Image (cartoon, rainbow, N blue to C red):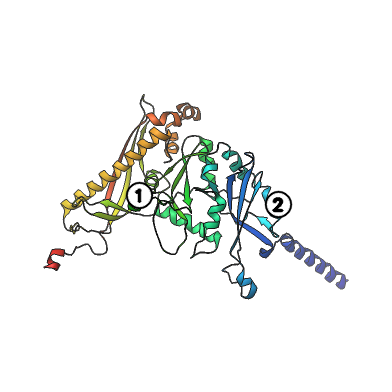
Amino acid sequence: MTKQKSLFKMLCLLSFLLLLLSGCWDQKEVEKMAYVVAIGLDQDEEDENRVKITYLISNPEVGSLAQGGGAAGEEPPREIISFTADDFITSRNLANTVVAKEITYDLLRILVVSEDFAKNKKFLRWLYDATKEREIRRDIKILVTKEQTSSFMIDNQPLLETRPHEYFEMLFNRGKKAGMVPSSDLLTFFRITEADADLFAAAYGTAQQNDNSSGKNKDPEQAIAGELQYGGETNTVQYAGSALFKEGIMIDTLTIEETRLMFLLHPTENPVAILTNLPDPFNEEYQIATRIRPNGQVKFDMNLKKETPSIDVTVPVIIEVLTNHSGTNFAKDSEKRIKLKESFEDRITKKFEELIKKTQDEYGTEPFGWSLVARKEFLRISDWESFDWMKTYPDIEINVSTEVRLGNFGRQGEMLNIKDVRD
């Protein structure tokens, strides 16, 4: 009897252990999977109802301790293949004609779209395929390229970070903090497109450097990707500026300066710190290097019920002075600090006004996310829909102002008197 009880207990224990092991039945080894990090989308040249798919497949073992030495240490960090398909969902099976491993989107980080395809009226139909695939997360990024995505991915060869899955993460994180490119995730694209009110801003990049000699003396703030002139031994790809989408179709690009202004005007998408130059009010020959940071939330005062709707926008920022080539002693002279503060406010406000006017005259709506704030002014959804933000925005009277609080004047506030040194 005792042996039977022991045997029964043993069987119960084994049955319980089998339940624990059931979670491992469908496990897949990393080396047996092909992890797609980026998907490129281009219009097929022969059939407008098909797309050209480009896969950037990452080797997750490269750079890890699991890679080891020997033949495994010589594996390439990536593989790129391009082919034509009906969509990027069924294309995974087509890729297995040349890739032996199972294609997976578990590590998908970015959707790369060529500018020509993004301006195609049918582009939205293909992009919405991402809503059907369970493996595609909604926080993946969208990047618009000047050239074909296959050429872009082949030319994109970063030297300091060879692992593609980490490269794109660091790229967008750093770009948003510096205000160089928008975060542009897939979920935001769907939300803005379906709301049919605002513009969506996607990151803009290219591997084609503009050979125009006139661009050598161009202000970097007024450039987009491909227009920045540089030399040396580095990656040829540039990421700068924004691609604007209206109702799911690309309509224009924004420069680096316009992208940064867009960030500052947005109620939620604020950069960490913007490094830029502003004119020196005490000497027109020099520029002052500054660090601009948001100083709280953007303030709105909306009156949308009157015949001519109006919006008053106040943007609070902190500006730190990092260079002072004119030698003006701001730290000890309060009157000069007041003049400096007013100069910064006038300069930034003027830039805001120019960008807002451009959105009203050329785009008919804005990329600042203001419609989310405007909705709160209406009690019912029907009232908001009848207001028709996209139709009304061009005629809204918009007044914008900048509240500047001066921060530090560098590690050493006092300036050296250059005349005394030369004497």
Residue 141: percent from left, percent from top: 53, 50
* Camera-nearest label, 1 or 2: 1
- Residue 303: which quarter of the image? top left
Q: Are marks 1 and 2 in contact (CB under 8 Å)?
A: no
**Nearer to us in this view, 269 or 129:** 129
Q: Amino acid at mark 1?
A: Ser
Residue 151: percent from left, percent from top: 55, 53
Decide if residue 271 is on the left or right side of residue 290: right
Residue 228: percent from left, percent from top: 39, 53
User: Is 208 above or below relative to 131?
Assistant: below
For the point 39% across and 36% down, the residue is 359
Label 2: which secondary element: helix
For the point 47% across and 49% down, the residue is 203
Q: Is residue 58 visible?
A: yes
Q: Residue furthest left?
A: 423
For the point 45% across and 27% down, the residue is 387
Q: Quadrant of the C terminus?
A: bottom left
Q: Is residue 67 visible?
A: no
Label 1 sits on residue: 214
Label 2 sits on residue: 93
